[in-house]
Image (cartoon, helix red, strand yellow):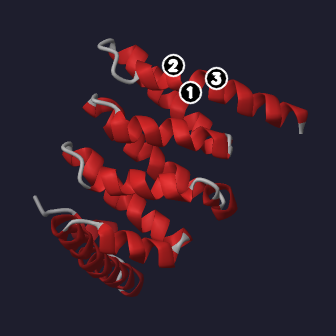
Amino acid sequence: KVLRNKLDQFSLYILQELINLIQNAAKVVSSAGTVCVRYIVTYVHSPRLVPVIVTNLTTNKSKEIRSTLSEVLVLLLEKWPAQTIEKQQQAVRDAIRRACVDADAHARNCGRKAYWAYKRLFPDDAEHLFANLDAAAQKQLERERNVGSVDSLHHIGQERRTITSPRSPSASVSER
């Protein structure tokens, strides 16, 4: 319990500096910052970290930082329990909204992934968020929903074929 509190405080203390490393021109430094931020979000589930992440995601001018933090937001929504996120739900919702309309294509893509992760945790609130998005973002989310259901059906069909008719290794070898 004591270690958890100290780790929360330490993570909060270094998080902003690690985020600043993401835009560093030296690839090794940038990658190290990104990996550290991901580890913190994966293993330190503290609501006090959310404001630092979403503030940088919504206000930072660096596309690298916005793009990476959009990925981190998806990770946060997938790994953290809903009750931990509830305390910062408004800030998370605003960050998703901003990420879905970001100038960077990768950040927008991650913003849409964050929306679907958010919808799994807070379905009613996600519908409210969807209604407040602009028409282009809504259309893209709808497109992804339809493509996702088709892809999952295609995947199931592929599995069924593999299970019912396995190919022998010699069938794929050409005759010489």
Q: Position of residue 113 (x, y in %)?
A: 37, 60
- Please name the residue shown 51% across and 19% down the image: 17
Q: Which quadrant would residue 15 be assigned to in this image?
A: top right
Q: Where is residue 19 in the image (x, y as percent from the top left)?
A: 46, 26
Quarter of the image with the N terminus is top right
Numbered disc total: 3
Image position of 87 (left or right of 89): right
Compare residues 117 and 137 and report the one nearer the observer.
Answer: 137
Indicate the amino acid at tag 2. Answer: Glu
Taking 108 as reference, is 34 above or below it?
above
| Dots 1, 2 in contact, CB < 8 A | yes
Q: What element does badge 2 sit on?
A: helix
Query: Few, some or many C-alpha atoms within 10 Å of disc 3 (few <14, some 14-19, many ≥20)?
Result: few
Residue identified by numbered label 2:
17
Specify the farthest residue to the right. 2
Residue identified by numbered label 1:
15
Taking 47 as reference, is 142 above or below it?
below
| Dots 1, 3 in contact, CB < 8 A | yes
Image position of 85 (left or right of 26): right
Compare residues 72 and 165 and report the one nearer the observer.
Answer: 72
Q: Where is residue 92 in the image (x, y as percent from the top left)?
A: 48, 54
